[in-house]
Image: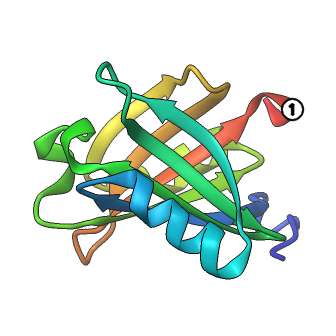
């Protein structure tokens, strides 16, 4: 794990990929049924089907979100978003200054402050700081 230091004040806590798919349910069942992952964080849409869910086993977490629930401008041909949990979003914002913004700082219903940027390869990277470290 990357520890904070005087030369690197940012402590990266965890990386969780967010895979953008047409349907969440079969994806999470794949991990749960075959490898015993625990299904977490289920978010149903207006029609009752899941628009987001995650599976977890130990320190490994995989998130799934439906293509329909992601604004088209946020994808631009990609189907993976890196979701990085950090201890200091202010430091991340400073480090990301000048990177193309996908979504500026915002508070989520699940208790985090987040920003999303594009990395040079065009992939979306989200950084989140949860309430216990805010």
Q: Nearer the viewer, residue 73 or 89?
A: 73
Q: Which residue is mark 1?
A: 132
Residue 31 visible: yes
* Residue pictured at 68% horizontal, 40% vertical: 129
Q: Quadrant of residue 46?
A: top left
User: Could you tell me residue 47's position as x and y percent?
Assistant: 29, 23
Q: Nearer the viewer, residue 118 or 82?
A: 82
For this view, does 111 lie left or right of residue 127?
right
* Residue pictured at 63% horizontal, 60% vertical: 55
For this view, does 57 lie left or right of residue 113?
right
Q: Nearer the viewer, residue 93 or 31?
A: 31
Is residue 72 positioned above or below 110 on the image? below
Crowding at mark 1 (Cα within 10 Å: few <14, some 14-19, many 20+): few
* Residue pictured at 60% horizontal, 58% vertical: 84
User: Could you tell me residue 75's position as x and y percent?
Assistant: 19, 55
Q: Where is the N terminus found, in terms of image quarters?
A: bottom right
Is residue 68 positioned above or below 30 on the image? above
Q: Nearer the viewer, residue 122 or 26?
A: 26
């Amino acid at each position: 794990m990357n520890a904070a230091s005087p030369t690197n004040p940012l402590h990266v806590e965890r990386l969780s990929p967010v895979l953008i798919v047409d349907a969440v349910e079969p994806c999470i069942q794949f991990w749960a049924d075959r490898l015993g992952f625990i299904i977490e964080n289920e978010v149903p849409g207006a029609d009752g089907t899941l628009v987001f869910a995650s599976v977890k086993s130990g320190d490994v977490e995989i998130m799934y979100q439906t293509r329909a629930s992601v604004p088209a401008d946020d994808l631009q041909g990609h189907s993976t978003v890196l979701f990085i949990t950090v201890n200091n979003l202010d430091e991340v914002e400073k480090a990301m200054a000048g990177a193309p913004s996908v979504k500026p700082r915002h508070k989520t219903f699940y208790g985090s402050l987040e920003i999303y940027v594009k990395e040079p390869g065009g992939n979306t990277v989200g950084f989140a700081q949860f309430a216990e470290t805010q």
